[in-house]
Each structure stands twice: as structure tokens, then as C-alpha cells.
């Protein structure tokens, strides 16, 4: 998920010739932004004007460079080569890629040995045949030339230049055949094995999970070569799936020495000097409401009736007081971008002394907070809000289950009498805010979250649905209100910030959705540019239909993915014009930046020195990286859970339709597997992507998204995290 990009802020690389550690996560590289300094422009102009490719010394002579200018020239040239604008031919001469009709992009590998190039400029992916993939690995950046079309009409890419290598280390299992040792990468998108010479194996044994440092990258005529750098253990060791994911997705999981030293130097409790300039809200009975296993408490809430409306306090941990811009803790937090949550383990964005200690709003201890105080009208509109730093003291650490138990029974649990009245006020406020949400037209999808229960050895006992109740929704609505106020506050002052952007659906997605709905006699209102309310109204109309799951899935798939960006395009799903993340600075870096921006505005200044565009890309990428790593671990655990159930028959629902088969999610197990198209019967099945179905040409048999299906589990592969099903009668 990490990609090559310009420096996010003003911090230099730690070592000459290297990118900052923040940007050093090479699982998937992405184009660098074109350099804009004068040297880059001069290099471009000189190469474009040249009648032929230029040798390096010829280029230097043409530019009449002085000795003192070489460092800046070399940096600009290297950046141009990384971005794919300038390439070096086999003779070692430099030329502009455009003159060769070269297309730079990122390589996406496939386990079958072929791959694709995702062009930097967008557009359809280009097919890379297996013989061309020999010289690159998944995630590398390359410049290619279109060399024709295959039988399916896809453009075939021939690799001309490898622009950037994505992998320095690769995790996998050691194998040996005929005395030759090699690593089979855990990431099956890397289809090539890494040769390990005898002197490079160290003490590692065949069958163990190791990381290999790549000494020689692949070429047309040679496999990559590496040496063992770290022995992780055996494949079935408890927690190995997480150790693999940390390295597979290049997740930073050890804090730098400077960050650890900075955390140790922090006090264990608040000091008198920490309270200067803060409102004292320790008498206000704020409470936290979180999950049973939560250890880091970002937010505390309190509400009172005020006339016909309410006054709501949302207190958020003041992380920015301890994590200062540009210091070691900030560099590590920025590189991580987010905390990563695995089953039974968390890789925090901040050291534990902060995440579970000083910054966590634990009960009955003084804590620093940034507070959003809101006056909310009887119809859920925020009439007034104010931000300020404060010192607070949480009265109670409550859980969603506990709170919902009291509210549903309308009586306090033993020992919770003091907070019960507050909870009832919060519950009333929630209903008011939720009604305003409905009037606003926010989309409210119904999704099922699951939770894994483990035995003492760390293996899954069962997977159970995680009940979502109104206690969750109380906190959600309070946080949404604070986030919107934070966005309005910064927009009104013209201060740059990272918005949480959820753009309008793409026209082609809307067209596909309308075509699908029309076949069922349904219509999405709103013309060519439907609004969130149009989606919300359709959801209400179809909620009682037996095919609701299918229809909701289609609506979801028509929407874009939310990202972080300094360009405020609004949040489509929530129907907000300006929306930021303010409420989780312990675990999300964008929230920490929002706090800094708010503090700067309160002090009548600006938070300077940030490349907000690059930071938005980085935070979006680290979020996706964390999601991918968590999904990878969950899939491994699910395969382990199901391996003793091979040959059993299950009921399920089609959760995905592709040109090669159906993905089916089992009802009571919440795991997915593939029914290959070849197992569907003696027929030619045609994939209809707009309808999300496979249609048999001879029999007319249809398999559609959300169809019910009975399947037999026939194969579980832990290494590929894959399960195979057969249709069962």
C-alpha cells in the first residue's frame, strides 16, 4: 500500500539517497509526482530538443552545469527517472519517454504468472505476459510499450524499463529441491521464487517462515536472488499469521529508538504546567462508551437538556499536546498513518504509554482533551459550537453491551445509578440527531460485523455476528456531530486540512446500476447525478424485499471509496458538505492533523509547512494497507478454522460473481469460498458484469449475486488463504 511520492512535509530523508522512513513501505509502488524545480525543467527541455538520446556527460555539457550544481541536478534527474518521464536505453543514454511512446505505471502481479500494468495516467490496465513478468515483481514500477493485442482484445505490454523496485525484503516459506533452496513468497502476486544460495540461508531450515533480503532483482534471464534476513518460525506457530502480514504489507511495527526514548521521557501523570490555558471540566460527568476489549479511549461524552434542545460535550484526547510536529513521535506516527487492528493484537500508531496511558481517557484520572461543545436544537441542528482545550476526568468506562442493557431495560445496572440519567439524555439526543440524519438524506446501509472467539492457543473457536445496537449509534451520532463542526470551523477560517472525502458516484457506475434496477422494475431517482437522499429513499422502499441483500450490495458497489484529501468534495454517503476526522487522534493521523489545525486557528495563526496533497495520499494508502493486512490475517484464520470441515455441506449466499466463478459466503460461519465456473455444470456460462450473474447458454441457468446456494467444502489452502466449494444438491 505504500507508494513512492514527494515528501509529505518539510522533513528530509534520514539517509542520503533514501526516501524518508515515512514513505518507505514498498509493497506497492506508485508514481512519484513530477519534479517542478528548474533543473528538472532544464533536463526535460534539453532532452526534448536533442536530435538523439544523450549520454549523461553530454547532457551535463549542454546544461553547462557547475560542480556545485551537480547534487541538485542528480536529484532532479533521479526523480524524473522514477516518475517515468526520462528513461535510459540499453546504450546508457537518456531520452524522454514520450518520444518512445512509453507508458509508465505500476505492475500488478497474478499468481498464475502473468500481470497487468496500471498506467500512471489512468485508463485500462495493460496485460503483461508471463515471459515479460520474469523481469519484474508485483508492485514494481515500469515503463512499457504496447506490443499488440491478445485474443481477448487486451493491449499487451512489453517492458522497456524498470523504473523502481518495490521490494527489498520478501516474506515466505523456505523450500528445497535437488539441493537448491528457494523462498516461495507468501504474497502470491509475486509468482517468482527467490533463490537462496547455501551461504545465504544462515541457520534457517527448510519449511520455516523467513524474510529474505533481495540481493539481485529478477531479469529476463535470471530469477531473483536473496539471503535470509530473519527467521520467524514455523507456519503453524501461534500468531505467525500476524508476523507474516506485518512483513508482507511492510507495516511499521517497531518504534524508532528516538520515539521510544521520547515516550519514556513523558511524565506518568499530568503536571500543573500542563493545565495552563485550559478550561477545567473535571466536574463535568463525562463518560466513555467503547467495545469490551478496547484499551485506548479517544472520546468522552456528556449531554444535558437545554430548553427544548440539548447541550453536548464531546471531549477528544489531546494527542497533539504530546506529539509535536516534526519530533520523533510525530515521524513514527505519520509513517504508520493509523493503528492496525488484528484479531487479538493491535499495532498502535503511538507507543503504549500514550495510546493506553497519557492520551487515553481512562476513568477517574485527569486527562488533557480538545473539546467540541455544541448547542443542538430540538430538530437536531447545531445552533452553535465552540472548540477549546480542557482538562477532564471521565466518570466511567462503559461498554456498548452494558449501556444497551440499561437503556433497553430502562433501568440502571448495579453501581451505574449515577450515569443512568446521562445515558437516557444521550439516548433522547441520539433519536433527535438520527431523525435529522434521515431528513438530510444520509445513506444508512445494513451491514453485519463479525467477531472471532479464540482458544488458549490462539486458534478460532467460532465466528459470531457482532450485534450493533443503539449504544453504538449514540456514540456514532455524537462523533459525526463533532466531526462536522470541526470541518465547518476550519472551512470558515480558510485553513487547509485533510477532509474525509466520499465523492459522487461515477457516471458509468450509475448507468450500470440503473440498468440493473430497471430489470427489476425499480428506479433510482435523481437523474444523471443522484443525491444521497435518492439512495436513502430507494433503500427504504426495498428494505422489506426478499432480494434486499442483493439490491443493497449493488447500491454499495456503485459508490466510490472514501479518501483523505485537501480538496473538499464533500461526503456523499453521510450527505455532509464538509467533513473531517477529529475524534480518533490516538489511532488516526489525519485526526491529529485536524487538532493541530484547530489549535492554530484558535491561536490566530496557520499550521504551515505541510504538503496536504501528499499527506492525503499517504494517509489514504496507510488506511488501505491496514485494511488489506487485517483482511489477510482474518482469511488465514478462517481457513485454519475450516480445514477440519472439508467434505461438509453448508448453506450460503453468493457474495461475488466473476468471469471464473462464484464466491459464496457460508451462513453460520461467515467465511467465503470459490465455486469455480467449471463446477457449475455442463454448459457455457457467460459472465454478465452489469447484472452480476453467470448465465448458462444452453440451460438458461442463472447464478446471481445474493442467490442462495448449498455448497460442499472440498479444499482449504492456508498458504493462498483460499477455500474451494462444489455445488451440493
Image: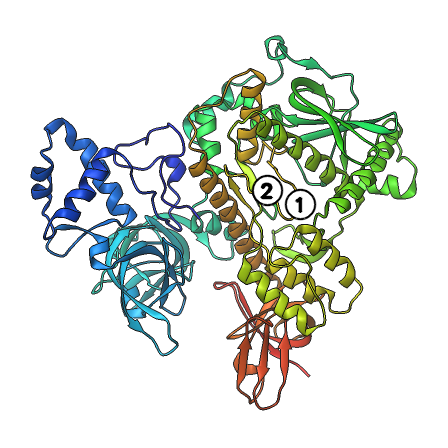
Residue found at the far front of this picture? 527
Residue nearest the viewer, comparing 667 with 459: 667
Disc 2 crowd rating (10 Å Cα; few below 14, some 14-19, many 20+) is some
As drawn, 321 above or below 76: above
The residue identified by callout 2 is 570
Provide the secondary structure element on which disc 2 rests: loop
Residue 599 x, y percent position in the rendering: 57, 20
Residue nearest the viewer, comparing 665 with 454: 665
Residue drawn at the location 28% of the way across and 64% of the way down: 134
The residue identified by callout 1 is 574
Residue nearest the viewer, comparing 156 with 650: 156
Residue 459 x, y percent position in the rendering: 61, 55
**Left or right position of 676 against 196:** right
Q: How is the image coloured?
A: rainbow
Residue drawn at the location 40% of the way across and 36% of the way down: 22
Disc 1 crowd rating (10 Å Cα; few below 14, some 14-19, many 20+) is some
Q: Is residue 52 visible?
A: yes
Image quadrant assignment for residue 382: top right
As drawn, 518 above or below 30: below
**Left or right position of 676 against 413:** left
Residue 609's label in the rendered image is none
Q: Residues under labels 1 and 2: Cα distance?
A: 9 Å
Image quadrant assignment for residue 446: bottom right
Residue nearest the viewer, comparing 448 with 42: 42
**In which quadrant will I find the C terminus?**
bottom right
**Left or right position of 201 against 619:** left
Counting every numbered tag in the picture gives 2
Residue 117 x, y percent position in the rendering: 35, 60
The reply to whether dot 1 and dot 2 touch (C-beta < 8 Å) is: no
Amino acid at each position: 500500500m505504500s507508494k513512492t511520492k514527494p515528501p509529505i512535509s518539510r522533513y528530509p530523508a534520514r539517509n542520503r539517497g533514501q526516501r524518508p522512513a515515512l514513505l518507505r513501505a514498498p509493497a506497492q509502488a506508485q508514481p512519484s509526482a513530477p519534479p517542478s524545480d528548474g533543473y528538472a525543467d532544464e533536463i526535460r527541455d534539453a532532452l526534448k530538443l536533442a536530435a538523439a538520446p544523450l549520454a549523461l556527460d553530454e547532457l551535463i555539457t549542454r546544461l553547462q552545469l557547475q560542480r556545485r550544481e551537480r547534487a541538485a541536478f542528480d536529484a532532479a534527474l533521479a526523480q524524473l527517472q522514477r516518475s517515468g518521464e526520462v528513461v535510459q536505453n540499453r546504450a546508457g543514454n537518456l531520452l524522454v519517454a514520450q518520444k518512445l511512446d512509453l507508458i509508465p505505471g505500476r505492475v500488478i502481479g497474478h499468481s498464475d504468472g502473468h500481470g497487468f500494468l496500471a498506467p500512471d495516467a489512468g485508463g485500462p490496465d495493460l496485460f503483461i505476459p508471463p515471459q515479460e513478468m520474469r523481469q519484474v515483481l508485483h508492485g514494481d514500477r515500469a515503463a512499457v510499450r504496447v506490443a499488440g493485442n491478445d485474443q481477448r482484445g487486451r493491449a499487451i505490454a512489453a517492458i522497456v524499463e524498470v523504473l523502481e523496485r518495490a521490494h527489498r525484503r520478501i516474506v515466505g516459506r523456505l523450500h528445497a529441491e535437488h539441493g537448491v533452496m528457494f523462498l516461495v513468497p507468501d504474497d502470491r502476486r509475486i509468482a517468482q521464487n527467490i533463490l537462496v544460495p547455501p551461504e545465504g540461508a544462515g541457520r534457517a531450515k527448510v519449511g520455516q517462515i523467513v524474510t529474505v533480503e533481495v540481493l539481485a532483482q529478477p531479469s529476463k534471464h535470471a530469477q531473483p536472488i536473496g539471503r535470509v534476513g530473519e527467521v520467524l518460525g514455523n507456519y503453524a506457530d501461534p500468531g505467525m499469521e500476524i508476523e507474516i502480514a506485518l512483513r508482507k504489507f511492510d507495516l511499521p511495527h517497531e518504534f524508532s529508538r528516538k520515539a521510544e526514548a521520547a515516550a519514556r521521557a513523558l511524565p506518568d501523570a499530568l503536571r500543573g504546567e500542563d493545565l495552563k490555558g485550559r478550561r477545567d471540566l473535571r466536574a463535568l460527568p463525562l463518560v466513555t462508551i467503547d467495545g469490551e476489549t478496547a484499551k485506548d479511549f479517544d472520546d468522552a461524552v456528556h449531554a444535558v437538556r437545554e430548553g427544548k434542545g440539548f447541550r453536548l460535550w464531546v471531549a477528544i484526547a489531546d494527542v497533539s499536546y504530546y506529539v509535536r510536529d516534526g519530533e520523533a513521535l510525530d515521524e513514527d506516527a505519520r509513517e504508520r498513518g493509523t493503528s492496525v487492528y488484528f484479531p487479538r493484537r493491535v499495532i498502535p500508531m503511538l507507543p503504549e504509554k500514550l495510546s493506553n496511558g497519557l492520551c487515553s481517557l481512562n476513568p477517574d484520572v485527569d486527562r488533557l482533551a480538545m473539546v467540541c461543545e455544541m448547542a443542538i436544537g430540538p430538530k437536531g441542528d447545531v445552533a452553535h459550537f465552540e472548540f477549546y482545550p480542557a482538562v477532564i476526568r471521565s466518570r466511567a468506562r462503559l461498554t456498548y453491551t452494558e449501556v444497551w442493557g440499561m437503556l433497553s431495560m430502562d433501568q440502571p445496572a448495579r453501581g451505574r445509578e449515577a450515569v443512568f440519567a446521562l445515558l437516557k439524555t444521550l439516548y433522547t439526543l441520539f433519536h433527535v440527531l438520527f431523525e435529522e440524519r434521515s431528513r438530510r438524506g444520509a445513506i444508512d446501509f445494513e451491514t453485519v460485523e463479525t467477531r472471532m472467539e479464540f482458544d488458549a492457543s490462539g486458534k478460532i473457536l467460532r465466528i459470531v455476528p457482532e450485534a450493533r445496537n443503539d449504544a453504538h449509534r449514540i456514540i456514532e451520532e455524537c462523533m459525526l456531530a463533532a466531526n462536522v463542526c470541526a470541518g465547518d470551523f476550519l472551512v470558515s477560517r480558510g485553513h487547509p486540512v485533510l477532509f474525509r472525502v466520499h465523492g459522487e458516484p461515477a457516471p458509468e457506475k450509475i448507468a450500470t446500476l440503473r440498468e440493473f434496477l430497471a430489470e427489476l422494475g425499480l428506479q433510482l431517482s435523481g437523474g444523471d447525478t443522484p443525491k444521497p437522499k435518492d439512495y436513502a429513499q430507494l433503500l427504504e422502499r426495498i428494505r422489506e424485499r426478499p432480494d434486499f441483500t442483493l439490491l443493497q450490495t449493488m447500491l454499495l458497489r456503485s459508490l466510490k471509496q472514501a479518501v483523505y484529501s485537501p480538496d473538499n468534495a464533500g461526503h456523499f454517503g453521510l450527505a455532509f458538505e464538509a467533513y473531517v476526522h477529529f475524534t480518533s487522534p490516538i489511532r488516526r493521523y489525519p485526526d491529529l492533523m485536524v487538532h493541530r489545525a484547530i489549535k492554530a486557528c484558535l491561536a490566530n495563526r496557520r499550521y504551515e509547512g505541510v504538503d496536504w496533497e501528499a499527506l492525503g495520499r499517504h494517509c489514504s494508502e496507510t488506511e488501505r494497507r491496514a485494511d488489506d493486512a487485517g483482511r489477510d490475517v482474518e482469511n488465514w484464520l478462517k481457513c485454519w478454522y475450516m480445514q477440519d470441515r472439508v467434505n461438509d455441506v453448508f448453506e450460503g449466499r453468493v457474495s461475488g460473481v466473476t468471469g471464473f466463478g462464484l464466491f459464496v459466503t457460508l451462513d453460520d460461519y461467515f467465511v467465503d469460498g470459490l465455486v469455480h465456473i467449471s463446477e457449475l455444470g455442463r454448459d457455457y456460462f457467460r459472465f454478465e458484469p452489469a447484472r452480476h450473474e453467470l448465465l448458462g447458454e444452453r440451460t438458461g441457468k442463472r447464478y446471481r449475486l445474493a442467490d442462495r446456494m448449498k455448497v460442499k467444502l472440498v479444499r482449504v489452502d492456508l498458504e493462498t488463504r483460499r477455500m474451494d466449494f462444489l455445488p451440493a444438491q
